[in-house]
Every structure is written in structure tokens, then in C-alpha cells.
Image: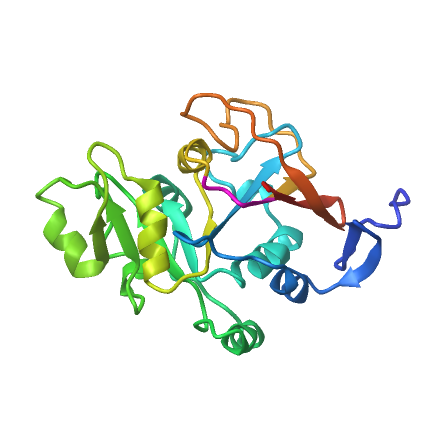
Amino acid sequence: MPNQPACYGRQQVDQLLPRFVSDIDPVSLYASDRRVPHGDRPWLMLNMVTSADGATSVDNVSEGLSGPEDRRVFSAIRAVADVILVAAETVRREGYGPPKTNPEVAASREGRNQSSRPRLAVVSGSLDLDFTAPMFEDRPPPMLFTVDDPPAHRLPQAEAAAEVHRVGDEHVDLAEVLQRIGQAGADVVLAEGGPGLNGQLLAAGLLDELCWTISPTMVGGDSPRMTRGTPPRLDRLRLDRVLAQDHTLFLRYLTH
């Protein structure tokens, strides 16, 4: 069997920047970051995984880009959020369920005066969702943000399964979404896509933090980028931290 590099198969996470620290605890590290809510809305994080050539999915799901090394940091990022914000398309494609935490993370959240696990918030103008799915059995139920005049035949089932908010004429008003989430007591919101939702958040100038996992893979094909569907713009980011586990990189950027 060929000799493998010394880093091959390592389970520990190392911090490369701003200074090298060996074998850090991602849960403690992300929990120690300072995130201050705005006057009118919570702090907004965006967490996405891409291949080295920029693909956000393989066969329309992100699972092929993830592994144990990604999921450990993914869980640490989720652990700091009060609310996880996701688009309906991603819910359907990825099979979302109620957010989960282990006892250690639940205890650390409660020590920060957070609920034991994040709450889910879904953006859907069409309300085209399976309201019998396990995610709607959660308590409190997911927050569901739709347009002012959603499809009437789906609205009763939506209101029976979720906490429905109507915010927007033709499109869901994401600034109002964040304000409503903040009014519900959330200080930190984590957006998990998909690219269309990410593009709208970027266009609205709502992003505060980008957590970007770079999978050591090349995909090719026509997978969408991390953001899409809105006019191009140039927003400069500040690199705050780089972590590595095995051959996977975890970048934390700030927008200000």
C-alpha cells in the first residue's frame, strides 16, 4: 500500500490562521466568536459547502461533498444559532428534519441562555411542502415565511403545521423575515441555502458572516454557485479564520 501523507485520515481539527493551534474544539471555538445583533435584526451567518471547483451539490444534493470532517464543524456552527433559515427547495431536496444537538452542546447553549437546540425557519412563496414531514412535528413548530397572498389551497395545512408569517408581495421580504425572527427572540440566524436564497440575502445586504467549507473534491458539471439569481455585485470580505481537518478547509469570513 502506498505511503500516505502524515495528515491523511486525521480526525483532529487544526487552526491554521490567524495562528496555528493544533487539535482545537470546533464547538468551543465557534461559540467564543463575538456576534452582535443589529438594531433591527439578528446577526446573519451563511454556512455552505462547495467542492474545490465551486460546486454546491452532486446530483442535486450537498451530501456528496460532506463527510465526518465536515459534519463536525457543521454541527459546531449550528450550535451557535438561535434559528436556522432555509429555502423550501433545499428542504425538499435535502430532506430536512428537526435540528438536533447532543447533550454537551445543549448544555452549552442553555449556559448562553439559548434554547437547547435551534429552531427552523423556512422561506416558501408557493407553500409547496410536505406538511406531514417530521420537521413539522417539532415543538415549537418551524416558522414559515411566505408571500402576502399564498396559494389558498395550501394555506390551511401550512397554518396547521407551522407558524406562518406573510411578508412580501410577489416575493418574500427577507429583511422583514429577519426582523420577525429577531422579534421572536433570536440574536443569531444561520442561513443554509440554497443558492437562490443566498443570492437574495447577499443582494439585500443582510450577510454578516460566511462560513465556507471547501471539500477536497472536483465535481465539474453544471452545479450552481453558492449564490445565484440576483444582479452581480462586489462585496469584499475579511478573512477571520482558517481551520483544516484532513484535506478539508473551513473558512470564516466577515463582511465588516
Tell how many labels.
Answer: 0
Q: Position of residue 61 (x, y in %)?
A: 47, 39
Q: Position of residue 44 (x, y in %)?
A: 48, 49
Of 213 and 17, nearer the camera is 17
Q: Residue at x 78, y 54 (%)?
A: 15
Of 170 and 26, nearer the camera is 170
The answer to whether residue 210 is left or right of residue 172 is right
Q: Which residues are magenta?
A: 206-211
- Whether residue 9 is visible, yes or no, is no
Q: Is residue 126 magenta?
A: no
The answer to whether residue 219 is left or right of residue 161 is right
Q: Residue at x 37, y 65 (%)?
A: 185
Q: Which picture quadrant has residue 93?
A: top left
Q: Residue furthest right?
A: 3
Q: Is residue 209 magenta?
A: yes
Q: Quadrant of the C terminus?
A: top right
Q: Which picture quadrant has residue 180?
A: bottom left
Rendered view: 11 above or below 4: below
Q: Residue at x 40, y 25 (%)?
A: 229
- Whether residue 162 is visible, yes or no, is yes
Q: Residue at x 83, y 58 (%)?
A: 21
Q: Position of residue 130 (x, y in %)?
A: 24, 50
